[in-house]
Structures are given as structure tokens and as C-alpha cells.
Amino acid sequence: MNTLDNFLVKLWDAQQVYKDEQFGELPDWFDEAAGICDNLVNYSDELDMPYDQWRDLRDQLTAKFARSGLDIKYPFNTGGQPEFLHESKHGGLWYNPARLTWLLAHVRRIKGEGDAITQ
């Protein structure tokens, strides 16, 4: 499993723990007020990842968004930044169905479950 795939699986698990849908302990890098991209920054920091490696992961992630037909800055918020900031401020990021559906589809592909999706 590559680093980005590993992160996506761990992020899925973390948000499940955050919402009490799975037993476990939240990783230090997980921020419930941050989306996928900012949690990737936190995860990379936790691993003491060099900037170039983090930038490559960020580019891989935004490419996944683009291949899925999503906006690369606010992929799960049709209202752009204002909607994203509202979700972040009011605890809604990890209840956004578009974000969860996209993440779960990728986790299932990574784990070899379900149908192939746009990567």
C-alpha cells in the first residue's frame, strides 16, 4: 500500500472513531475541523515527511479529486470556501455525505472491496 492509500485508510478509520462508529483512539494528527487535505498535512508532519514528498502526496490527492470530476480546492462543497468554512466551524466536515462517499469508495478500492472507481 502506498503512502497516500495508507493515509486514506487511516483517515477513514479516524473519522469513524471521531463519530463513535468504531472503537479506538484518535490519532494525534487527526483534526475534526480539517478536511482531507489539511489532515494529509498533519499526517505528513507526524511522519516527519520531507516537503517534496508531502507535495507529491498532495498532488496525487488533488489528481484523484480531478479524476473524480471534483473541484481540487473544495471538492465536497458546491458552495466553495464559505460552505467549507461553515462545515469546519460547526463540526460538519465528517458528516458531509459527498466527502464520506468519496473516501469510502477509495478505501474499498484500496482494500480490494467493491467495484473499481476512478482513481
Image (cartoon, rainbow, N blue to C red):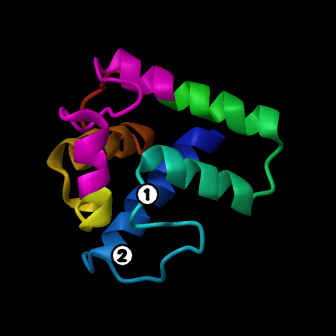
Q: Check disc 2 and give the amino acid type.
A: Val
As for residue 23 lying within the magenta part, the answer is: no
In the rendered structure, which segment of residues is drawn in magenta?
62-86
x%, y% of residue 79?
19, 35
C-alpha separation, residue under disc 2 versus residue under disc 1 = 15 Å
User: Who's the residue at 37% across and 36% down the image?
Assistant: 109
Which image quarter holds the C terminus? top left
x%, y% of residue 15?
36, 65
x%, y% of residue 82?
26, 43
User: Who's the residue at 31% across and 21% down the image?
Assistant: 68
SS of the residue at dot 2? helix
SS of the residue at dot 1? loop
Question: Is residue 116 rendered to the left or right of residue 26?
Answer: left
| Label 2 CA crowd tier, 10 Å (few <14, some 14–19, many 20+) | some
x%, y% of residue 90?
24, 67
Kindly tell me whether residue 16 is visible in this rendering: yes
**Which is closer to the viewer, label 2 or label 1?**
1
Indicate which disc, 2 or 1, sits on the residue closer to the N terminus. 2
Which residue does the numbered mark 1 point to in the structure image? 34
Kindly tell me whether residue 1 is visible in this rendering: no
Residue 116 quadrant: top left
| Viewer-proximal residue among 77 and 19 | 77
Q: Check disc 1 and give the amino acid type.
A: Ala
Residue 83, compared with residue 47, is above or below; it is above
Which residue does the numbered mark 2 point to in the structure image? 17
**Disc on res. 8:** none
User: Who's the residue at 38% across and 26% down the image?
Assistant: 65
Asked if the residue under mark 1 is in contact with the one under mark 2, i.e. CB atoms within 8 Å, the reply is: no
